[in-house]
Image (cartoon, rainbow, N blue to C red):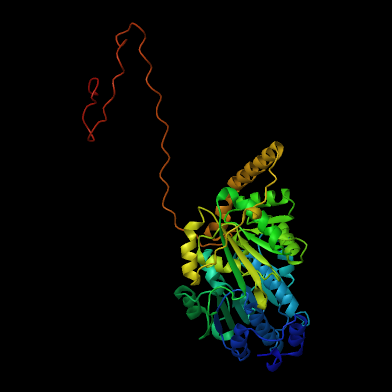
Amino acid sequence: MEFLTLDLPASVMQGIREAGFVTATPIQEAALPLALKGKDVAGQSQTGTGKTAAFLIAAFTRLLRGEAPAGAADPRVLIIAPTRELTVQIESDARLLGRFTPFRILAVYGGIDYAKQREALAEGCDVLVGTPGRLIDYLKQRVWSPRQVEVLVIDEADRMFDMGFIADLRFILRRLPPPERRQSFLFSATLSFRVLELTWEFMNNPTQITIMPQQKTAERVEQALYHVGREDKFALLLGLLRREGGDRILIFSNTREEARRLEDRLVRNGWETRALTGDLDQKKRLKVLNDFKEGKLPILVATDVASRGLHIEAVSHVVNWDLPQDAEDYVHRIGRTARAGAGGKAIALVDEASALCLEAIEKFIGQKIPVEWADDDLFLAEIKPSAEERRRYAEERRARLAARDRGGDRGRREHGRGGPDRRRHEPARHEPPRRPEARPAPPPPPRPPEGGPGAGRPPRRRRRRRGGGGPRPEGPPRP
């Protein structure tokens, strides 16, 4: 289906043409006709299938065809996403598709200037994209009101549950106009029972759409697996980078420290690399992502913070330095390449530890990952760090861990279980009463003088008196 066949406003069609879209993807073909009729849609679709464009086109069309409330500065479209990166991506897509519309688009999320975002939101917007924590912070301060929302979008709903945001999400949804007075869209990689409960409670008889490929992994992804010992793993990675080439290579690690270590080792061996981890400052994270998207940065090492919801064009290779413990994350990781009909290659380096995850992954994707065996000349010698570099790396690592420990209690108070965007907006929990503090013990009785009547004997232990009355165990009774 081509977009020209849809009855879309001229300004929306112009944005679609400028974005280079001609033919609708399966999720767009299924969702847009329903959405343009004003129906609620609950869609099951993987990332990279075009669902963001589907709900943005529908939202812009509804706003253009409706009347804006007189003098209102509050958002008419509310888009809730679980992560900062996804929020930034949706805002970017909204500005691209809506560049010829008169709407003001704003994104709010943690990690950047709080007061600046607050001022921008106070000035008003038409389309508001945000993470649950920051949205509730400003909502409680009455910086914005949800009473004028005409279109609601919940993106990556299953991820909301995974990250512990469901209480926050309900907090916002209960303050929106009733479902029959707005249009709602929900998209999720899986429509589990708990996700469907959200649709029953907060949507108006939504139409369910399921767009699943015949196989869980993208058909155009060429997969390869190398069994390699931990000690030889980096030497093989160097050889593969030299042999495969590619100008956008995404390497996934399971931990922040391993991602940092890979960054240091690759840079030392002549590969321009940056690490994208959850503890990186937000401005630096955005710069790293933009450099990678624009082709200025050839290699990006990331934890799973970047594995879902990010649309990065022309990723030629995805390398799983560690296999993920969750089989579904493997699909999301390699889905970063071969997007929008392009080709790509996914390489897994499986050592002794990662081999334990392989069976579950192959069972989940319903196929065996082809195994390749590396020749000896594919292993390249690593340039090892000097003693001074090792000492510097150790000091930096200790400083990062110390900073993380110092921020741990504060982070738990502010963010709870849900990650970096949970704020102090949870309803008060009833805590059990605290036990009274124990009083300090009385000082011990003075020792008898040497040679006195008690000399040489251990002090007598006073027995605890049972019952309420009666004489003391020692000494004469009271008169």
Say if residue 140 shows up in the picture: no
- In the rendered view, tell whether residue 215 sits above or below residue 401: below
Check the image and name the residue furthest to the top.
Answer: 451
Check the image and name the residue furthest to the left.
Answer: 470
Residue at point 59%, 66% (across, down): 333
Q: Position of residue 246 (x, y in %)?
A: 72, 64
Q: Nearer the viewer, residue 129 or 172?
A: 129
Residue at point 61%, 51% (across, down): 258
Say if residue 52 shows up in the picture: yes
In screen coordinates, is 290 left or right of 326?
right
In screen coordinates, is 439 left or right of 146?
left
Q: For residue 395, what is the image quadrant?
A: top right
Q: Nearer the viewer, residue 168 or 369?
A: 369
- State how many labels appear: 0
Q: Nearer the viewer, residue 58 or 271?
A: 271
Q: Position of residue 243 (x, y in %)?
A: 69, 60
- In the rendered view, tell whether residue 95 sits above or below residue 246: below
Q: Nearer the viewer, residue 403 or 202?
A: 403
Q: For residue 137, what is the image quadrant?
A: bottom right
Q: For residue 343, what is the image quadrant?
A: bottom right
Q: Position of residue 198 (x, y in %)?
A: 50, 76
Q: Position of residue 352 (x, y in %)?
A: 51, 52
Q: Quadrant of the N terminus?
A: bottom right
Q: Quadrant of the C terminus?
A: top left
